[in-house]
Amino acid sequence: MLTGWRKEHLHITLKVHILLFLGFFFAGVLLANLRWANESFWLGYQTERALQQIEMWKTERPVFLRFLLRNRLPVWIALCMCSRFYRGEPALLACSGWLGLSLGILSATFARQFSVFGILLTGAMMIPQIFAYLPAYLSLIRNRPKRSAAGVLKYILFSGVFLLGAAGEYYLNPWFLQKIYAVIHALSHSTP
């Protein structure tokens, strides 16, 4: 019987996070295709409109930077705090599920809107920041709470990797996304 939130009672492995992510990813795909078809079509329309305005990102970079900092940093700080304590592990699990659900809905929406090219576009939206966000998040999950100077240094290192991802999302992703979207737009309009 679970009498408290102690270390020996609550040991959630990386496999559980991956399974939760995949389960919610497929649930998101199903929801977007079956139940929320109209909502996902609206999301695809809104996203396509935003993609067509990528040129504006060059002139409105301070707005984009504020958006990134306002939406990424508080979540990262909360995840760091939750990962320091065993009682915070359910929040990390909820984040893994939310990431899977969001990516599933987005993937299904893009596949519906752009057919085969939607998968390419979904991947393009995550490059290059995923190469920093993912290792930083996985490091948080794997790093068990330790009260030591080395533990604090690990969090500083994780946060540095996370900030590199935010820098990549700010500087490189709009340029990369613009190129991929131009190719997808040309290919989708050239096919009969």
Image (cartoon, rainbow, N blue to C red):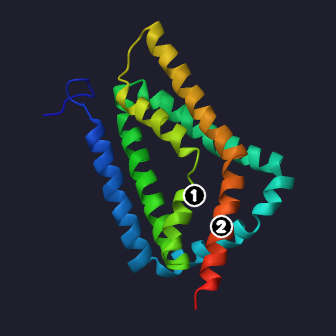
How far separated are the C-alphas under marks 2 and 1? 9 Å
- Of residues 83 and 154, the one nearer the viewer is 154
Residue 24, quarter of the rendered image = bottom left
Visible in this render: residue 162? yes
Q: Quadrant of the N terminus?
A: top left
Q: Secondary structure at mark 1?
A: helix
Q: Earlier in the sequence, mark 2 or mark 1?
A: 1
| Circle 2: residue type | Tyr
- Identify residue for label 2: 181
- Residue 28 drawn at (x, y percent): 40, 65
Label 2 Cα crowd, 10 Å radius (few <14 / some 14-19 / many 20+): many
Label 1 Cα crowd, 10 Å radius (few <14 / some 14-19 / many 20+): some
| Circle 1: residue type | Ala
Q: Secondary structure at mark 2?
A: helix
Q: Residue at x 46, y 76 (%)?
A: 36
| Left or right: 150 in relation to 182 | left
Disc number placed over residue 124 in the picture, else none: 1
Q: Quadrant of the C terminus?
A: bottom right
- Residue 134 drawn at (x, y percent): 47, 40
- Say if mark 2 contacts mark 1, CB within 8 Å: yes
| Left or right: 80 in relation to 13 | right
Q: State whether residue 28 is above or below residue 153.
A: below
Q: Residue at x 50, y 78 (%)?
A: 115
Q: State whether residue 33 is above or below residue 132.
A: below
- Residue 123 drawn at (x, y percent): 52, 58
